[in-house]
Image (cartoon, helix red, strand yellow):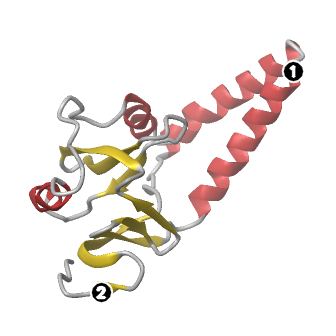
């Protein structure tokens, strides 16, 4: 999990590291499909009836993406907290200068996430699954570099809704 002596050439010493899935794999039952398919068809018919062709395209693309995602396994990504910022699988590095704050949503077993807000208002929040990492350890390390947003305790409404609806 943590390797306190590993050196990153560009980003300082790695303070904490773990792996997490790229996205949460949803186990959808047959009942979910029995409920979702008629809704998608009804929305598509409504979009075509009202001549809202863009909405029809969005429904079709969303359906194709959901089916495609269902058939693929999520990639395991490596997340590292370093002295200079956070690194997501060597693909994206976010300096602590670019991050405004962080908060933890920890309600196991359903919700175990770490969130970052960016100083740039147009950037979406960064959500990282904690997996089996102790949130107190994460808080201890991050508190040295970023303020914790104590007003935010749970997961954002959009993510809770997506989890409940298995999207």
Specify whether 33 is left or right of 106: right
| Neighbourhood count class around disc 1 (C-alpha, 10 Å): few under 14, some 14–19, many 20 upward | some
Q: Position of residue 56 (x, y in %)?
A: 81, 29
Question: Could you say which quadrant of the image residue 151 lies in?
Answer: top left
> Disc 1 on helix, strand or loop?
helix
Q: Position of residue 79 (x, y in %)?
A: 36, 69
Q: Residues within 10 Å of mark 2 (few under 14, many from 20)?
A: some
| Label 2: element kind | strand
Which label's residue is closer to the chain start, 1 or 2?
2
Q: What is the quadrant of residue 1 in the picture?
A: bottom left
**Residue 137 location, quadrant:** bottom left
Residue 21, position as x, y percentages in the image: 41, 65
Q: Residue at x 39, y 35 (%)?
A: 164
Q: What mark, if any, has residue 48 been given in the picture? A: 1
Q: CA distance from mark 1 to mark 2?
A: 57 Å
**Number of numbered discs present?**
2
Q: Is 51 on the left-hand or right-hand side of 124?
A: right
Determine whether 135 is above or below 164 in the image: below
Q: Nearer the viewer, residue 50 or 100?
A: 100
Task: Please tell me which residue is depicted at 47% across the width and 63% down the height of the picture.
Answer: 22
Are discs 1 and 2 less than 8 Å apart at CB? no
**Location of residue 27 in the rendering, given as x and y in whole percent from the top left corner:** 44, 53
**As drawn, 6 above or below 62:** below
At a point 82% along the width and 34% down the height, the residue shown is: 57
Q: Classify residue 22 as left or right of residue 55.
A: left
Give whichever of 104, 157 is nearer the camera. Answer: 104
Nearer to the camera, 50 or 16: 16
Label 2 belongs to which residue? Answer: 7
Residue drawn at the location 29% of the way across and 51% of the way down: 114
């Amino acid at each position: 999990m943590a390797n306190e002596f590993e050196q990153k050439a560009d980003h300082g010493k790695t303070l904490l590291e773990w792996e997490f899935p790229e996205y949460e794999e949803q186990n959808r039952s047959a009942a979910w499909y029995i409920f979702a398919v008629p809704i998608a068809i009804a929305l598509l018919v409504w979009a075509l009836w009202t001549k809202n062709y863009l909405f029809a395209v969005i429904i079709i693309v969303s359906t194709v993406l959901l089916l495609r995602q269902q058939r693929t396994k999520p990639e395991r990504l490596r997340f590292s907290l370093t002295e200079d910022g956070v690194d997501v699988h060597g693909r994206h590095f976010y300096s602590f200068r670019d991050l405004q704050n962080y908060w933890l949503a920890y309600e196991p077993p359903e919700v175990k996430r770490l969130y970052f807000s960016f100083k740039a208002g147009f950037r979406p929040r960064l959500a990282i699954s904690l997996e089996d990492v102790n949130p107190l350890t994460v808080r201890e390390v991050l508190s040295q570099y970023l303020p914790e947003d104590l007003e935010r305790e749970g997961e954002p409404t959009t993510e809770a809704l997506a989890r409940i609806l298995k999207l």
